[in-house]
Image: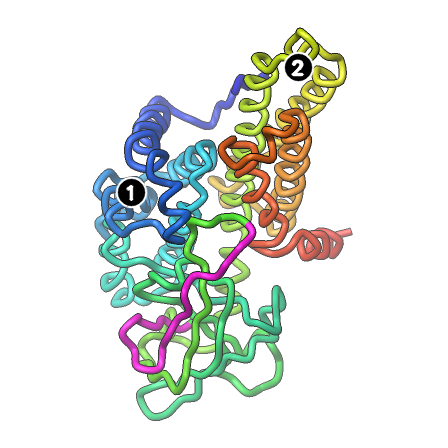
Amino acid sequence: MEYLIPRTLFSSEHDEFRRAVRRFMESEVAPFHAQWEKDKCVPREVWRKAGELGMLLPSIPEEYEGPGADRLFDMIFGEEFFRVGATGLIGFGVHGLVAFYLLNYGTEAQKQKWLPKMVVGEAVGSIAMTEPNTGSDLQAVRTRAVRDGDEYVLNGSKTFISNGASCDLAIVVCKTGTSGKGAQDISLIIVEKERAGFTRSQPLEKVGLHAQDTSMLFFDDCRVPVENVLGGVEGKGFYQLMHDLAWERIIGAAGFQAQAEAALDHTIEYTRTRMVFGKPVLDFQNSRFTLAQLKTEVQIGRSFVDSCMELLLKDQLTAETASIAKYWTAELSSRVVDACLQLHGGNGYMTEYPIARLYLDTRGNRIWGGTNEIMKEIIARTL
């Protein structure tokens, strides 16, 4: 779409990367995404192709065999797959979260073991936070790891886990302490797929995001060596989670913003060509005013998200600001898509049209990455 305020974040190198990502989406993703929705997962070969092109984890440093680019490259990749409606690739973003937990907090041995494999798509990561009865309250997790010599014995279950059925490693949020002080008892433990006692469900049936593997994980006396604690020290898990959730929320916001822009673009084009009572839908005042309002809101969202990315690059993005971005763009994407679907009339309810698929996919935006109600709670704490 046309940006009324120029985007000044990007260099010519970023622009070239965006063009390469668009080619990748057009040749390797968009033509096959409908089949992936039926299969409920993205084939591993697509992960490997993205890895070969330096698109899977562009900002992992060269010392771990990554491209060594800045986080704007991650943002560009996210914007482009959301732009074409390839929501199966949300798993790539979760994979990136896992990689940065390892990069920021892992021991050197953990980094060397996993990051080079993750960069090329040989190993897929997931982060196992949510439990059936705890939702967004991470301090209330019941999954527990009990020390037994040089191992932990892990028991519990997780739900709504992106990449759950296909992951090679899961970073599991669990309790290792018994102080009863909540955050101080929580650790993150790496669990490899081949561990006895670690099983997963088939991908869950969801309203939208059908190509994205979302599953349940189960741990039944699963034995894990003590060196698998992220960073090698117990009781740091809650801090590690909170520090990196800001990135999860801002990269989510960038994707939600791209969805709103795509919906607006699809609808402007549709209303120009769809004839009703002998004239284009766009020629009716109601259509023009609705689209004018949406264009205004989308432009405001774009400026705010880009400003947040500037703060992130300076390491100045706060949890409050990231929560505002996630909350606003999740609401924006749902609002824009709903209004745009209405302007499509009956065709908007047909999944052959992009707007219908956006309608299914954007509803989850107000839930995942922390519900919008939790975002309001975080924001309200600063009043």
Q: Which residues are magenta?
A: 189-207
Nearest to viewer (mark 2 / mark 1): 2
Residue kind at label 1, given as amino acid type: Gly
Out of 34 and 157, give the one closest to the viewer: 34
Out of 165 and 379, give the one closest to the viewer: 165
User: In which image quadrant can residue 14 be found?
Assistant: top left
The local secondary structure at tag 1 comes to loop
First along the sequence among labels 2 and 1: 1
Residue kind at label 2, given as amino acid type: Val
Dot 1, how many residues are within 10 Å of its Cα: few (below 14), some (14-19), or many (20+)? some
Left/right of residue 317 with respect to residue 232 in the rendered view: right
Dot label at residue 281: 2
Residue 100: x percent and y percent?
39, 55
Asked if residue 262 shows in the view, the reply is yes
Question: Separation of disc 2 and disc 1 at Cα?
Answer: 48 Å
**Residue at screen point 60% across, 31% down:** 348
Reply above or below: 257 against 286: below
User: In which image quadrant can residue 107 be found?
Assistant: bottom left
Residue 141: x percent and y percent?
56, 75
Look at mark 1 in the image and give the residue it sits on: 68
